[in-house]
Amino acid sequence: MNILQGFKVIDVTAWAFVPSAAGVLGHWGADVIKVESPGAPDPMRLLGGSLEPGRSADTFKHYSRAKRSIVINLATPDGQALLYRLVADADVFITSYLAPTRRKLKIDIDDIRKVNPKIIYAKGSGYGPKGPDADRPGYDAIAWWARGSLAQSAMDGNGSEWPTGMVGHGDGMSGMVLAGGVCAALLHRERTGEATVVDSSLMGTAVWFNGTEILRSQVNPKQRVFRPVKREPIPPSLSPLAAATMFLYQTKDYRFINLLFLGDDDRDFVDLCQRMERPELATDPRFVGAKARQAHVPELTAIIEEIFATKTLEEWKVALAKARGAWGPIQTVEELASDPQTIANGFIRHVDYPGGGLNLPIPPILFDGEGGDPPRAPDYGEHTEEILGEIGCDPAEIERYRGSGVVV
């Protein structure tokens, strides 16, 4: 499959969402060069895998297919100079790094465009490039499944009172969307010479995927009753990836918060303890260090469950707003529509129709920061005369076609 043969892509990404977009471009024939750091490979390589040849994790093999690998220290001037040499004749630069890291490594839009003004600069994030959470870490389980209301929609659909596990893999689905956006930008550049910045996000893709529920909620809002749910006792032995900071917790008003502190970083845990108003947990010998917390998952999880049950979902949204670690609320479609990130990025926009209007999701790609207002759907046969006129039919000919029933 070589429809993108001849296009060169520089991939400075990690985990799954944006790497999967670059993997699609590689599968379609582009020359994708994946740049990783010395001593800090893409974490997805090691998620059940290793750095031994051929031993990377299965998910990495899936999403980083068809790439060539190079290891460069981008935190050094020499490393940055080498990257710029790679960029000089590239067609696409794609990254999952958030703005503070891009600025630190000197790989932000202006840095790359100084080297190659005609390059397509593509970036993916959890929550979109605008709004209060633009620079927060986001993964598919929280930004796509939980906050994107897909989890609540699944619960509504199957009558469950407890959020189900994520259906599908939001990273891969969102990556395919971003790959399509990059291809659209390449086509635009080929035709006009204009290079654009392409943005996509897990949350924006969730809004699009859940569009039918968003529309139904405007016509027939759901009346939900949230109830307490008793979870089974946590077994003493959990999978090696399980941690108390990678768990679902129910709030005082019986809603849910999904913590997803990948890596179980000590700094994230200390920060969480402060925000839970339980700073002493950070110095409890059972919970000092990731290994100790792993050895006491049931105890720590039980404590955090009790703490989360003391405040409502809205109260926890405020308390956790600036938390270091990644987290997301299980939102309804109504809450998604009024979410500050949805509003800031314009993921949902109003369309006028006779007799009223609708709020419609836009395709989850921004070109130069803009997604465009959604045009309305056409009425039945609304443009028949216009289209036939464009192919040379005169009014008499169109009338003849109408009379014979060929067109309406």
Image: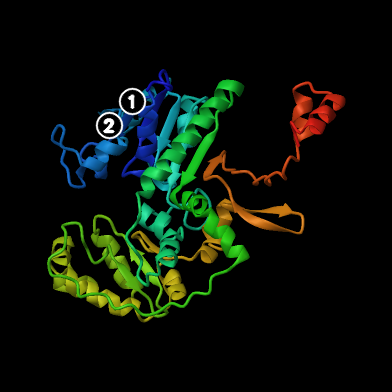
Question: Is residue 280 visible to the viewer in this orientation of the structure?
Answer: no
Label located before the other in sequence (1 or 2): 2
- Give the position of the N terminus as an image quadrant: top left
Q: Residues within 10 Å of mark 1 (few under 14, many from 20)?
A: some
Q: Classify 281 as above or below 269.
A: below
Amino acid beneath label 1: Leu
Quadrant for residue 248, please give it: bottom left
Quadrant for residue 160, please give it: bottom left
What number is the disc on residue 82? 1
Total tally of numbered discs in the picture: 2
Closest to the observer: 241 or 351? 351
Answer with left or right where residue 180 lies relative to residue 356: left
Which x, y percent locates residue 227? Answer: 40, 79
Amino acid beneath label 2: Ile
In what element is the residue under mark 1?
A: helix
Which x, y percent locates residue 339? Answer: 53, 62
Q: Are marks 1 and 2 in contact (CB under 8 Å)?
A: yes
What number is the disc on residue 72? 2
